[in-house]
DNA sequence: CAGCCAATGCAACAATGTTGCATCGATAAG
DNA sequence: CTTATCGATGCAACATTGTTGCATTGGCTG
């Protein structure tokens, strides 16, 4: 995830860490990029590009074009500090900006919250399946939707 | 998958099997639904809704509306005889119309072909991760894109 | 300060997906 | 056979999501 406790500190740390990752690679972290990153971290759930656009337009006090949003998101995903949730046409902050990026995303249908984990065993299994097929894996999309612990406790 | 040998026989069997599955559940298999199913099986790769629309409009000799296509695809996916590839906004025929549907889709970036497997170990792993999070899994999306055996042999 | 290149603004457009309502057609009851 | 009913389709308009090209800005470098 996602800061399980939504305290300011871990939030800020996550954002700062992402910024550092980008900078260490020589990539520019512009105000827009930082604003998008902050919005993603703050939301802690998948946000659509146009929703992000509306939010940022208000925050920054000026109109942001879809193109800018998409380019910014492409940048962040490319750096591994954000990820696209394909099954929702939405984006989340990512706290594992590792090289080989094969996170499993758990997305709650009720509250929308998104948790992210890595699982080495799972990677090995997929690698084994791929080998058997002679398939060379590029990008991975692993998204599980359902009901998170909190929502089950309350409503189930 | 996908009929590894693309002979007419296994193709026809796959389609017929899917039709039977639907009928046994009391669902109607209309000409349009059968045509879509056939197109998916024949293609053996993810096809977009609008591409499907064009193809069927020609095949059937009349214009099919996007709404009809999407409703038909919803039906087929609901029956488990087709699946949406989220990372491509496209659809493929599915040969494992089981209840709990957690196929892994391998999609080739070069030739577009799509293979589908089931993996019980992988299911157990995901279930274990979910349990640890207290997450109740509903839908699963597992899509791996890369290069298939054939394309690596030829072009790599 | 000058020059360069990446990042952004802006506008138009393209692709994908949805909704509401009218109509058709298959199945079931009489 | 006729009629009632309900699901499937046709159709049109619309909503959402994503892209492209080109002009402009802005930050780093020499």
Image (cartoon, coloured by chain):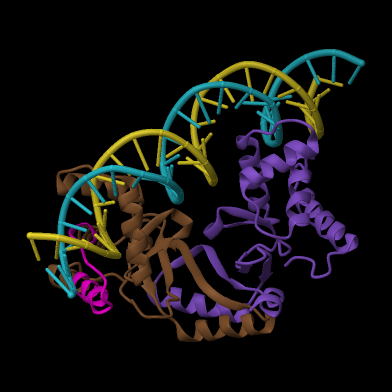
Chain colours: A brown, B purple, C yellow, D cyan
Q: Is residue A16 magenta?
A: yes
Q: How many numbered tags mark residues here?
A: 0
Residue plotted at (71% across, 31% down): B63
On the image, the x and y values in percent for residue A69 come to 31, 52
Q: Start and end of the magenta stretch? A: A15-33
Residue B127, image x and y in percent?
50, 75
Q: Is residue B62 above or below residue D26?
A: above
Q: Nearer the viewer, residue B91 or A9?
A: B91
Q: Give how far across and how far down residue B78 sits, in percent.
A: 63, 51
Q: Is residue B69 above or below residue B95?
A: above
- Dominant secondary-structure state across the stretch colored magenta: helix
Front position in the image: A26 or A32: A26
Q: Residue at x 46, y 85 (%)?
A: A120
Q: Is residue D3 left or right of residue B91?
A: right
- What is the quadrant of the C terminus of chain B in the image? bottom right
Side of D9 where B87 appears, left or right: left
Instruction: Please give left or right for residue B33 compared with residue A111 in the image.
Output: right
Choose top left, top right, bottom left or bottom right for residue B7: bottom right
Residue A111 can be seen in this image: no
Q: Position of residue B97 (x, y in %)?
A: 71, 61
Q: Residue at x 78, y 45 (%)?
A: B34
| Up/down of D5 relative to B111, above or below | above
Q: Residue at x 65, y 40 (%)?
A: B69
Where is residue B44, by image quadrant?
A: bottom right
In the picture, the quarter occupied by the N terminus of chain B is bottom right
Q: Specify the quadrant of the image occupied by residue B35.
A: top right
Q: Is residue A61 magenta?
A: no
Q: Is residue B64 visible?
A: yes
């Amino acid at each position: 995830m996602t800061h399980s406790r939504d305290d300011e500190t871990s939030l800020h740390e996550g954002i700062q860490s992402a910024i550092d990752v980008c900078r260490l690679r020589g990539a520019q972290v512009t105000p827009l990029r930082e604003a998008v990153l902050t919005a993603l971290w703050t939301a802690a759930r998948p946000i659509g590009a146009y929703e992000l656009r509306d939010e940022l337009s208000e925050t920054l006090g000026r109109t942001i074009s879809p193109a800018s949003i998409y380019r910014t998101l492409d940048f962040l995903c490319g750096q591994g500090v954000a990820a696209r949730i394909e099954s929702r046409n939405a984006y989340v902050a990512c706290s594992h900006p590792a090289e080989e990026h094969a996170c499993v995303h758990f997305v709650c249908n009720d509250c929308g919250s998104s948790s992210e984990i890595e699982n080495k065993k799972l990677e090995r299994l997929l690698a084994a399946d791929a080998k058997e097929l002679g398939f060379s894996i590029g990008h991975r999309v692993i998204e599980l939707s359902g009901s998170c612990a909190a929502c089950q406790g309350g409503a189930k």
